[in-house]
Image: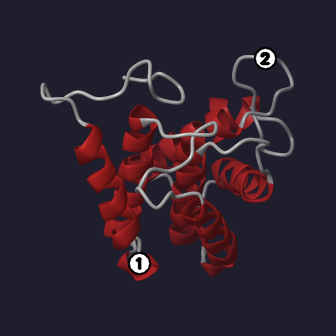
Amino acid sequence: RYAARSARKDGSCDDYYPFERASGAAAFSLLACLDAAEIIGVNGDEEVDGFFMRRARWLATHEESGRLSNHEALIAACLARTSERFGPEWEAPLQRRLQRLLSWQSPEGWFDEYGGADPGYLTLTVAQLADLDRRRPDLSLRPAIERAVGFLHAVQHPDGTFGGEYSSRATV
């Protein structure tokens, strides 16, 4: 209820800066709220469902200026869960966001993050796509996931880690 009451009227929210309307913060929080509602059995609550629909609608139509594949994967995960909860009207936005994300995958398997490869962020993208594939095998995400995992395998350090100063966002 706090998330619903603190959201902007259009469903968006800020991350760090006032009035920024951050896709990442909106997607992370919606995904957590949808999962929590499923776990504790919140169904048919007008305030909660209205919030879920507003936030999902905002995410479905808002596009960030840069390519942040992990955010796009989170948005797709939110739209898939929104579709599960509220029906097939969310399928078209889900398909559109997935097509957009998949178009950002390089031939090497990585997904664009701020103009390059970033193994740290890629792990979140892979996790969201893998969960989507588990929930919705009809989306045919397995080939993209396999290419991304292949890239991660290729850049993994001998000690099992990857990332660092050479990646686009220097994640570890």
Judging depth in this view, the residue of 62 and 67 nearest the camera is 67
Image quadrant where residue 38 sits: bottom left
Residue at the (66%, 52%) spot, across then down: 52
9 relative position to 100: left or right: right
Query: Helix or strand or loop: what does disc 1 sit on?
Result: loop
Image quadrant where residue 9 sits: top right
Q: Is residue 1 visible?
A: no
Q: Is residue 143 above or below residue 116?
A: below
Q: Where does the image place residue 47, in percent across and percent down from the top left? A: 70, 48
Residue at the (80%, 58%) spot, across then down: 61
The kind of residue tagged 2 is: Tyr
Q: Where does the image place residue 115, in percent across and percent down from the top left? A: 63, 39
Nearest to viewer (mark 1 / mark 2): 1
Q: Is residue 36 above or below residue 150?
A: above
Query: Helix or strand or loop: what does disc 2 sit on?
Result: loop
Q: Which mark is residue 124?
A: none
Q: Is residue 75 visible?
A: yes
Q: Are marks 1 and 2 in contact (CB under 8 Å)?
A: no
Judging depth in this view, the residue of 22 and 90 nearest the camera is 22
Q: Which mark is residue 17?
A: 2
The kind of residue tagged 1 is: Ser
| Labels 1 and 2: the sequence-earlier one | 2
Residue at the (44%, 50%) spot, across then down: 110
Q: How is the image coloured?
A: secondary structure
Q: How many marks?
A: 2
Q: Where does the image place residue 141, in percent across and percent down from the top left? A: 41, 71
* Residue at the disc numbered 1: 140
Q: Where does the image place residue 133, in percent across and percent down from the top left? A: 36, 68
Residue at the (83%, 36%) spot, across then down: 8
63 relative position to 87: left or right: right
86 relative position to 13: left or right: left
